Image (tube, grey):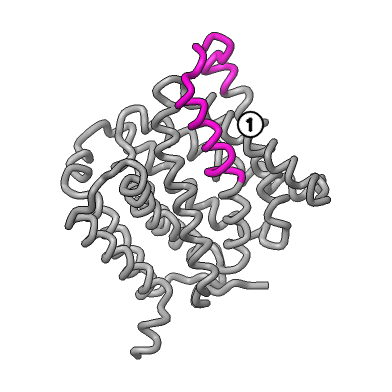
């Protein structure tokens, strides 16, 4: 079954996209707290392994079998590399030197990479001028929303910024590759991917981080790891695979535009932060970009 790029998303799809933005937006905050105390590979292992354990328990409770198909496991391993091992490690590494705001700007290039990859690698998700305009508009909205202070950070550590951009490119390929799992139950697909990612992270963690020599974590850092594993990984990937099967790769990647506004909303609700004109203008740009990609309003106007 194909999922054409031109298919408009339903209200339910947009709701899932919004929830995903909250879950993955929180990962930048959780990661920033955890990386202050533990090194990147150990944090990533705890995130994917914790998510895999949670999903294994959920699958058993729902009577779902652990995926054993050899063909599927080849896909799980490739997707784990593209969607977890490479980008998670690069993002946590980058966040050692740059803030969450700049990291989310660079991460917002994911839809552009995803649209380019799916344009050349698929027959049913071709790039159109309207979708390209929407992606560019959404990216500019993210940049405006975070204001001049975040943009001036582009003159900071180039290696850290390159790491986040490479992570976004890896996500773009993962969005395309994940299409082949759209007929697999979302919980089983997420469980297989996170199990493969956990196994791949073990030698990296043992060799690079020597976890037995690490100091004990503070309670805020422990809470951050729990949040990464449960909310930003286990629950998020179940929703993501469900959305990917419904609306396709290009539309699913739009979640990265909604991550900065989600982080802003959490700051207003829980940290008593205020709303600025830059943020209002940026969110308007993001909204326009998403409406261009969806295309419904513009098709009606036409």
Between residues 268 and 53, which one lies in front from this camera angle?
268
> Does the magenta portion include 215?
yes
Between residues 219 and 89, which one lies in front from this camera angle?
219
Q: Is mark 1 on a helix, strand or loop?
A: helix
**Quadrant in which residue 194 is drawn:** top right
Q: Which residue is drawn at 58% across and 29% down?
A: 46
In the picture of the structure, the residue carrying the numbered disc 1 is 200
Observer able to see residue 117: no
Residue 266 location in percent, x, y?
37, 47
Q: Residue at x 59, y 72 (%)?
A: 3
Q: Is residue 252 above or below residue 270?
A: below
Location of the N terminus (image quadrant): bottom right
Which residues are the magenta region? 205-234
Location of the C terminus (image quadrant): bottom left
> Does the magenta portion include 190?
no
Residue 281 location in percent, x, y?
21, 62
Q: Residue at x 47, y 47 (%)?
A: 24
């Amino acid at each position: 079954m194909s999922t054409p790029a031109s298919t408009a998303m339903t209200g339910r799809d947009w709701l899932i996209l919004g929830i995903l933005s909250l879950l993955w937006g929180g990962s930048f905050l959780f990661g920033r707290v955890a990386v202050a105390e533990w090194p990147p590979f150990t944090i990533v292992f705890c995130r994917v392994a914790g998510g895999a354990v949670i999903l294994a328990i959920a699958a058993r409770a729902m009577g779902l079998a652990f995926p054993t198909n050899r063909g599927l496991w080849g896909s799980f391993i490739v997707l784990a590399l593209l969607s977890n091992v490479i980008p998670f490690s690069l993002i946590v590494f980058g966040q050692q030197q740059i803030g969450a705001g700049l990291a989310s700007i660079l991460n917002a290039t994911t839809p552009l990479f995803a649209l380019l990859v799916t344009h050349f690698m698929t027959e049913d998700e071709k790039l159109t001028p309207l979708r390209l305009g929407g992606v560019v508009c959404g990216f500019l909205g993210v940049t405006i929303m975070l204001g001049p202070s975040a943009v001036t950070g582009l003159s900071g550590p180039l290696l850290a910024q390159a790491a986040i951009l490479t992570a976004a490119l890896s996500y773009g390929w993962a969005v395309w590759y994940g299409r082949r799992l759209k007929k697999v139950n979302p919980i089983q697909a997420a469980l297989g991917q996170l199990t493969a990612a956990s196994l791949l992270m073990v030698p990296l963690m043992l060799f690079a981080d020597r976890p037995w020599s690490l100091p004990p974590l503070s309670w805020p850092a422990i809470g951050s790891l729990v949040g990464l594993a449960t909310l930003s990984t286990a629950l998020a990937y179940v929703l993501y695979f469900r959305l990917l099967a419904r609306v396709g790769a290009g539309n699913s990647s739009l979640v990265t535009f909604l991550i900065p506004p989600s982080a802003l909303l959490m700051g207003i609700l829980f940290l008593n932060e205020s709303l600025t004109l830059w943020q209002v203008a940026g969110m308007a740009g993001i909204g326009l970009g998403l409406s261009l990609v969806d295309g419904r309003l513009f098709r009606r106007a036409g």
